[in-house]
Amino acid sequence: MSNISAGSEDPVDQEKSYSYQPMTAGERKVIFASSLGTVFEWYDFYLYGSLAGIIAKQFFRALIPHRASFLRSWLLRLVLSSVLLEH
């Protein structure tokens, strides 16, 4: 059998050539901002999931459940399409 190698350098020597560089202030700022955005997004998702049942009962009290979900999706599609087409 033949021995085929992808590169001529030894991977262990290649790992040793990297040096540690501390994060810059800009990198820390980006990590903080993206983490904060993720926290807000998950909090919003949690609130929506927790309150969706309560709010749906208030808006669609007299409707049959499958008609309520159809109406809700139709209204959401109408609103989102008007918002997206404006931009």
Image (cartoon, grey):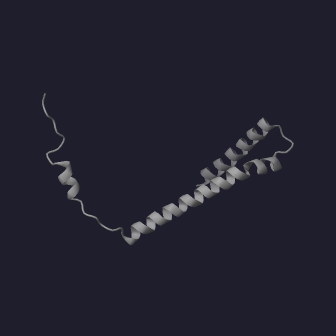
Looking at the figure, which quarter contains the N terminus?
Answer: top left
Q: Which is nearer the eye, 18 or 24? A: 18
Q: Vertically, is 21 above or below 38?
A: below
- What is the x, y in percent for residue 87? 58, 55
On screen, residue 73 versus residue 40, left or right, reads: right
Residue at point 40% right, 66% down? 27
On screen, residue 22 versus residue 30, left or right, reads: left
Name the image quarter holding residue 69: top right
On screen, residue 50 versus residue 5, left or right, reads: right
Residue at point 59% right, 57% down? 41
Q: Report the residue that reaches farthest toward the right.
A: 62
On screen, residue 51 versus residue 44, left or right, reads: right
Name the image quarter holding residue 86: bottom right
- What is the x, y in percent for residue 24? 36, 70
Q: Vertically, is 71 above or below 26?
A: above
- What is the x, y in percent for residue 77? 67, 44
- What is the x, y in percent for residue 59? 81, 49
Q: Which is nearer the eye, 25 or 10? A: 10
The number of numbered badges drawn on the structure is 0
Residue at point 20% right, 51% down? 12
